[in-house]
Image (tube, rainbow, N blue to C red):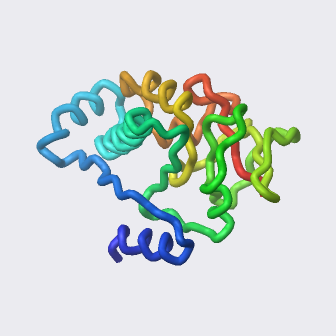
């Protein structure tokens, strides 16, 4: 099925506005050399490098926009009704990177609640958590992530999956709970 049609149908159902960003295709002549060189130097597969470049472009768009935060979803995300009030809210000042997804895997979260959006608690992650399918990033985190990925030595998914002690690019990573 067409992934954009899937995301658009979900957005319509939830009455939220999505802006489409076409991911960087590692096979595109426009990006092929840059992706190839980054792939060789990092040991990452070209698709992983292109994924990193795509997320990086979204962070750059946030910085150019003047907005304070941006929700980023990959086109296979399944959006639940509970996401609407979260997307309509500003993150608390102590949170710059909030993962919105779950895979059903157990993770280690801080017992302390860093903030709330309605009934949902925001807690810091302290262990591996798979995926970069949905997250909110602030300008401060976007700047740090761009600097962190200036030289590609790990793909974005790995960085979001394996935050070292719950930190990515010097930014603590938080998760929705429950």
24 sits to left or right of 84: left
**Which residue is depicted at the point 62% across and 69% down?**
80
The reply to whether residue 76 is in sight is yes
**Location of residue 6 in the rendering, given as x and y in whole percent from the top left corner:** 42, 73
**Location of residue 97 in the rendering, given as x and y in whole percent from the top left corner:** 61, 38
The residue nearer to you, when weighing 42 against 35, is: 35
**Location of residue 177 in the rendering, given as x and y in whole percent from the top left corner:** 77, 53
**Which residue is depicted at the point 62% across and 35% down?**
96
3 sits to left or right of 95: left
Determine which quarter of the picture holds residue 94. top right
The residue nearer to you, when weighing 73 against 87, is: 87
**Which residue is depicted at the point 34% across and 38% down?**
53
Furthest-right residue in this view? 111
Q: Eyeballing the image, is 88 above or below 26?
A: below
- The quadrant of the picture occupied by the N terminus is bottom left
**Location of residue 47 in the rendering, given as x and y in whole percent from the top left corner:** 32, 46
- The quadrant of the picture occupied by the C terminus is bottom right
The reply to whether residue 52 is in sight is no
**Which residue is depicted at the point 49% across and 40% down?**
67
Furthest-front residue in this view? 66
The residue nearer to you, when weighing 5 against 29, is: 5
């Amino acid at each position: 099925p067409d992934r954009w049609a899937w995301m658009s149908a979900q957005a319509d159902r939830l009455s939220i506005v999505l802006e489409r960003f076409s991911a960087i295709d590692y096979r595109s002549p426009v990006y092929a050399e840059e992706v190839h060189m980054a792939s060789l130097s990092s040991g990452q597969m070209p698709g992983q490098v292109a994924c990193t470049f795509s997320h990086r472009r979204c962070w750059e768009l946030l910085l150019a926009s003047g907005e304070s935060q941006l929700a980023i979803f990959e086109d296979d995300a399944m959006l639940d009704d509970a996401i609407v009030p979260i997307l309509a809210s500003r993150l608390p000042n102590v949170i710059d990177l909030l993962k919105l997804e779950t895979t059903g895997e157990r993770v280690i979260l801080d017992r302390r609640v860093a903030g709330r959006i309605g009934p949902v608690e925001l807690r810091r992650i302290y262990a591996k958590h798979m995926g970069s399918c949905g997250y909110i990033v602030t300008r401060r985190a976007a700047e740090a992530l761009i600097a962190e990925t200036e030289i590609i030595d790990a793909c974005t998914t790995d960085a979001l999956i394996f935050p070292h002690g719950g930190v990515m690019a010097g930014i603590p990573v938080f998760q929705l709970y429950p």
